[in-house]
Image (cartoon, grey):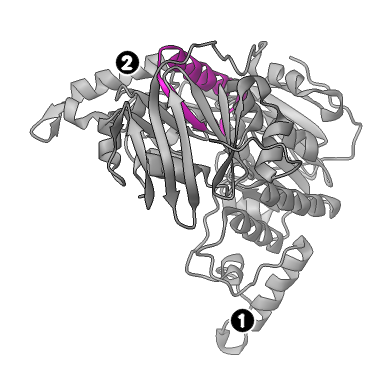
Amino acid sequence: MTHSDPDAAPAPVLALEDVSKSFGAVRALQDVSLRLFAGEAHALAGENGAGKSTLIKVLAGVHRTDSGRVLLDGEPVDFHSPADARDAGVAVIYQEPTLFPDLSIAENIFMGRQPRQSLRRIDRRAVHAATVALMRRLGVGLDPDRPARGLSIADQQIVEIAKALSFDARVLIMDEPTAALTGSEAARLFSVVETLRAEGAAVLFISHRLEEMFRLCRRVTTLRDGRLVATELLAGLTEDDLVRRMVGRELGDLYPKERTSPGETALSVSRLTREGVFRDISFEVRRGEIVALAGLVGAGRSEVVQAVFGVDRADVGEVTVNGRKLPAGSPTAAMDAGIALVPEDRRQRGLVMEMSIERNIGLTGLGDLGRGGLVRRTLESARAADWAVKLQLKYNKLGDSVGVLSGGNQQKVVLAKWLATEPKILIVDEPTRGIDVGTKAEVHRLLSSLAAEGLAVLMVSSDLPEVLGMADRVLVMREGRLVAEIPRADATEEAVMSAAAGRGGQENEAA
């Protein structure tokens, strides 16, 4: 283990000293130390299961340590609850904010502690003015009276940050804040973080996007299997260095694309149109081929694959599977024809979070797992256990709620659920969003091997290196239209982005 603290810095605002935390026989953290300094953004890196979430919950007062100390301004503290941590100036901004949807932005920020007038009436003018001041401080223009319902994830996170500032937060912990954001939304968030850092806040930043760590942070602490690997300056590292520290080995090829010889056409889409969303989309995917739909966020990629699967009904056009036309707007017909869809939002559309792992895997095969409407638990468990082995799922018990799994393992459950149907065509929308680099390589390896076995794969991805590394052909969309088809040999970042943004006349109009 190496631990090289680069600075003889002033006392940290918040620190962990030799902290350990276990849950039964599982040692989530073992002798981990961390120091957060005022005016500095500090990255926390590690694979899913490395101990990042446990460390955050110790700092936030959700978990208490088994051993070691938490220090605030150099003095030991014992947070018994999140309220204790919040009152001490420690705030956590999660990937999925939890606001009251029917209350205004201002009401959400000051819930339970609104300024009062005489007779204990809420001083709404003071609440509004304080919210305006917070938004001005953050450099954003959200209307304090706007209801939280309908706010984008990015705007909800801004409201959570404003709420933290209203408590005079000195430490801001940001857990995967950009996972569901567009590029422009992430850039605005970074601007807000820079403002807070310049004001003297200590920021702990957790992200699976390594480039964001290098862009935003000065130092990084890396965890592996609950242990501290290193704390060091990011300026002296490369992304490859950080990956090696996270996984404890050379990762090898992150995009292990097997060479295949595409077979006959499995999926044919002809002039598919949904008014106001996408128009005149035509393409084919052959057996043994991975075809990527690329483009900027909002180009219509996810909407196209949902129409292909029948979740959304197209107004015009045809979807043909192995020569047979599918009825529009029928996911059941698509499944019967051998199409599987792994959706972009695994938590909302891919899984039933309250159900067990084995029940989620079995959902697509209920007809095969029982009789007379009753599911045979032994068959369900056997099916789940088989796929857990095939996909190297990390879990405690198959009967546990799928919600306790890491993001990468949840994605594996969604894949298992659909691969269990033995599809001929696999549609995957953002297959590696929000999962760590090690699991990302496993998912890529799986997709490549499935294609090598003859599966036709249609992949939507906003991760350009993933598109270039895995696709045999790249179909580029812009503003609801298919504007370019680029073979693997010609696919470069410049070519794809030029077509996606409509720059430079480098498009090859798709047939």
Q: Is residue 14 above or below residue 374?
A: below
Q: Residue lying farthest bottom?
A: 118
**Disc 1 residue type (three-letter):** Arg
Residue 131, image x, y percentages: 68, 71
Please tell me which residue lies in front, 345 or 222. Answer: 345
Q: Is residue 191 left or right of residue 341?
A: right
| Label number found at residue 386 | 2
At 27% from the left and 42% from the top, the residue drawn is 327
Query: Up-down: is 126 above or below 15?
Result: below
Q: Residue at x 79, y 20 (%)?
A: 3
Residue 54, x across and y down, in percent: 57, 34
In this picture, residue 492 sits left or right of residue 118: right
What residue range appears in magenta?
A: 432-459
Per the image, the residue denoted by label 1 is: 124
Density class for disc 2 (Cα within 10 Å; few <14, some 14-19, many ≥20) is: few
Q: Earlier in the sequence, mark 1 or mark 2?
A: 1
